[in-house]
Image (spheres, grey):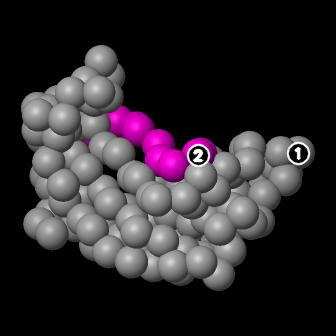
Amino acid sequence: LITKPRTANAWFGVYFDVQARDRAVTVQSIKTGCSSMAEGETLEVQVWSCIDGSGVGKEEDQSAWTQVYKGSHALDLIEFNKFQTSTTKADQYTELPLASPITLQPSERRGFLVHTNHIGGLIL
């Protein structure tokens, strides 16, 4: 799954859900990149997974989340243009391998958070 950058940065992080459709899906890593505001800077990056289901409504409940990745990275710069119609290539993103793969069963939904210590740390 690759999303096309549409705006500037995602501030310090971004919450999102992943849902398996008609078959199991295993999430082994998350790929992300930075905006020009954080280009070349080493960032503290964390990935969190919701313990049970969607992250919607649980964003501020720390007990609902478990950390599945932590590391220091200079993330790859993702160039964007809000009028761009082409998609961004997967190899342009920095891979963040999860401590253990997370398998979602058919129809199962799981919330994720990618967070950095910089306001321009992630591209959205």
| Gap between marks 2 and 1 measured at Cα | 21 Å
Kindly report which numbered mark, 2 or 1, lies closer to the viewer in this rendering. Answer: 2
Q: Which portion, as a residue range, is magenta?
A: 10-24
The residue beneath circle 1 is: 83
Q: Considering the numbered disc 1 on the image, is that residue within a helix, a strand or a loop? A: loop
Residue drawn at the location 39% of the way across and 52% of the way down: 114
Most distant residue in the right direction: 83
Identify which amino acid the numbered label 2 is placed on. Answer: Trp
User: Percent from the top left, x then y, of residue 37?
Assistant: 72, 63
Residue drawn at the location 61% of the way across and 65% of the way down: 34
User: Percent from the top left, x then y, of residue 84?
Assistant: 85, 51
The tag earlier along the polypeptide, 2 or 1, is 2
The residue beneath circle 2 is: 11
For residue 82, above or below residue 87: above
For residue 39, above or below residue 18: below
Residue drawn at the location 19% of the way across and 59% of the way down: 68
Most distant residue in the top direction: 57
User: Percent from the top left, x then y, of residue 33?
Assistant: 57, 66
